Amino acid sequence: MPRDAWAIVLATLVLATSDMPACAGAQPAAQSGLSGAAAATAETDLPSYVPPMRGAPRGRIGGASRGAGGNAASMEEIDVIAPDHVGLTRREQPTLYWFSKGRVPTAAVFTLIPTDTEKPLVERVMPGPQGPGIHAVPLAGSPVRLAPGREYEWSISVPDPGEDRSRDIVASGILKRDASGSAPPENVSAVDAARIDARSGRFYDAIEDISRALAGGATGADAAALRHARAALLDQVGLDAAAAFDRAPH
């Protein structure tokens, strides 16, 4: 091809490239259409839990029980939202969370007991039925205040309607208050607070940061982003069913 023809082709290509729109991935965050929590939950910004130094895993037991006749479709399954080791909180009165995979038709019982005693500090009946999902158990409003450095076992139990105690469902975890850490700044988003708490080893607080924002009325893209961030934390401690529930359409 003559040299002049090549020059014309190259000039045409340069002009065409300069008129192309910018790549969507390079779009500024302010123009991305995301707001609030949704703007803060790119994969690289999701909370990353750093467990405290620990020995052998201990601390979480899940519960499951088949329905009458051993029908797998009627399986009831619950988990406490806790790591498989002693989990930390900086709060005197944290809110704890548990997950039910299916509908829990009867009342559930919350129990909190120091691991160095046999006397429960709290035994609270939560009326049923409870639908599938993640449920809150706040300690605020009760006389209980966690002592720094002390370990507590907490559990959710669903008694068998027929009073056969061998068929009760029980899930439990272990909690310890670590008063040495500082709280995230008050002006940060729920996801950023969860990132700070998770990085500091405070799993219970990271879950509560996000769950409070969800309970506070987050909707649309912000609610979906909060559930996505919470699911990331649940995945990191092996709570796959609860994480899948958070990622499902709501």
Image (cartoon, helix red, strand yellow):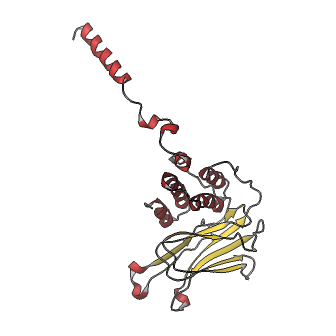
The residue lying at 70 percent from left, 72 percent from top is 152
* Residue 220 x %, y %: 48, 54
**Left or right position of 221 against 124:** left
Residue closer to the observer: 109 or 150: 109
Height in image: 214 above or below 37? Answer: below
Could you tell me which residue is drawn at 70 percent across and 69 percent down?
A: 140
15 relative to 196, above or below: above
Give the image location of residue 39, x and y in percent.
53, 45
Locate the C terminus and report the quarter of the image it occupies.
bottom left
In the depicted view, which residue is nearer to us: 210 or 3?
210
Q: Which is more toward the observer, 154 or 36?
A: 36
Q: Residue at x 52, y 38 (%)?
A: 30
Q: Position of residue 153 (x, y in %)?
A: 67, 74
Q: Position of residue 47 (x, y in %)?
A: 58, 52
**Left or right: 197 with respect to 106?**
right
Q: How many labels were placed on the picture?
A: 0
Which quadrant of the figure contains the N terminus?
top left
Identity of the residue drawn at 49% across and 76% down: 77
Horizontal relation, residue 60 to residue 150: left or right? left
- From the viewer's perspective, is residue 69 above or below residue 196? below
